[in-house]
Amino acid sequence: MSKSRIVIFGGSFDPIHVGHLALAREVCRQGLAREVWFMVSPQNPHKQDCCLSDERHRLNMVKLAIDGDEGFVASDFEFTLPRPSYTINTLAALEKHFPDKEFCLLVGADNWEKFDRWHRHDEIVARYGIIVYPRGNEEQPPLPNGVVWLKSPLYDVSSTMVRDLVSKGGSIDAYVHPAVAQYIHENKLYI
Ligand code: ATP
């Protein structure tokens, strides 16, 4: 029996926004995976994370945002791994923990450009495979075996934009799921 294919979408999700959700829907719509797992990162080796919101808040917001979306999973898997949790270690741990599943990574074209700086990047490509999605108007670059280019629209939103709007008292209704907006308000995040 073939293993079910899971796409790992890692991020800080501080907070999760409509761009993240639309992209994940596109992956499923194009039949690239059975499920997309939103892997909330406790710490990102490529990002200054001095000001990240508590990981529980970020996970809770992912759970609220994906509620009812079949095929979407909010994952705290990396919370239990030694930190910093390099992607290759996360993938190897996932493989061990879920032997009936096959994992693949979803990354933006901006990250793909500097992918050769990732820890054991060749092994990630060879063992797991990668789906790259556009972040700007870039053309599809030449890609090695195991890497697929996702044709998807661009979504003009970022978590930074959402946090800035909240801090200035602006409306974030167009950018996050209503339950996430409510959660941010109730927990006084980003003010
Ligand atoms: P921040 O503004 O805090 O840097 P972000 O909006 O980029 O956050 P992350 O949690 O870093 O959100 O996102 C996880 C992944 O989602 C990243 O690899 C990023 O490339 C991707 N992503 C973020 N925003 C979008 C978007 N609007 N469209 C497509 N991908 C996105």
Image (tube, helix red, strand yellow):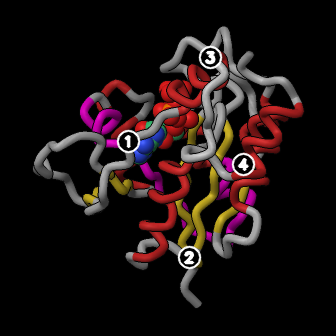
| Residue 120 shown in magenta | no
Given residues 163 and 48, the one toward you in this image is 163
Q: Kindly identify which residue carries mark 2.
A: 34
What is the spatial separation of the Cα atoms under label 1 and label 4, in whole angstroms? Answer: 19 Å
Residue numbers of the magenta segment: 93-113
Q: Residues within 10 Å of mark 2 (few under 14, many from 20)?
A: some
Residue plotted at (45% across, 39% down): 157
Q: Residues within 10 Å of mark 4 (few under 14, many from 20)?
A: many
| Residue 103 shown in magenta | yes
Residue 62 is labelled as 4
Determine whether label 1 and label 4 are within 8 Å by CB: no
What is the spatial separation of the Cα atoms under label 4 and label 2, in whole angstroms? Answer: 19 Å
Q: Is mark 1 within 8 Å of ligand 1?
A: yes
Q: Is residue 150 visible?
A: yes
- Residue 117 left/right relative to 16: left
Q: Secondary structure at mark 3?
A: loop
Q: Secondary structure at mark 2?
A: loop
Question: Along the polypeptide, which appears first: circle 4 or circle 2?
Answer: 2
Residue 173, image quadrant: top right
Q: Position of residue 185 (x, y in %)?
A: 81, 32
Residue 168 is labelled as 3
> Can you tell which of label 4 and label 3 is closer to the viewer?
3
Given residues 100 and 4, the one toward you in this image is 4
Q: Kindly identify which residue carries mark 1.
A: 156
Question: Along the polypeptide, which appears first: circle 3 or circle 2?
Answer: 2
The kind of residue on which mark 4 rests is Val
Q: Secondary structure at mark 4?
A: helix
What is the spatial separation of the Cα atoms under label 4 and label 3, in whole angstroms? Answer: 23 Å
Q: Position of residue 17 (x, y in %)?
A: 58, 44
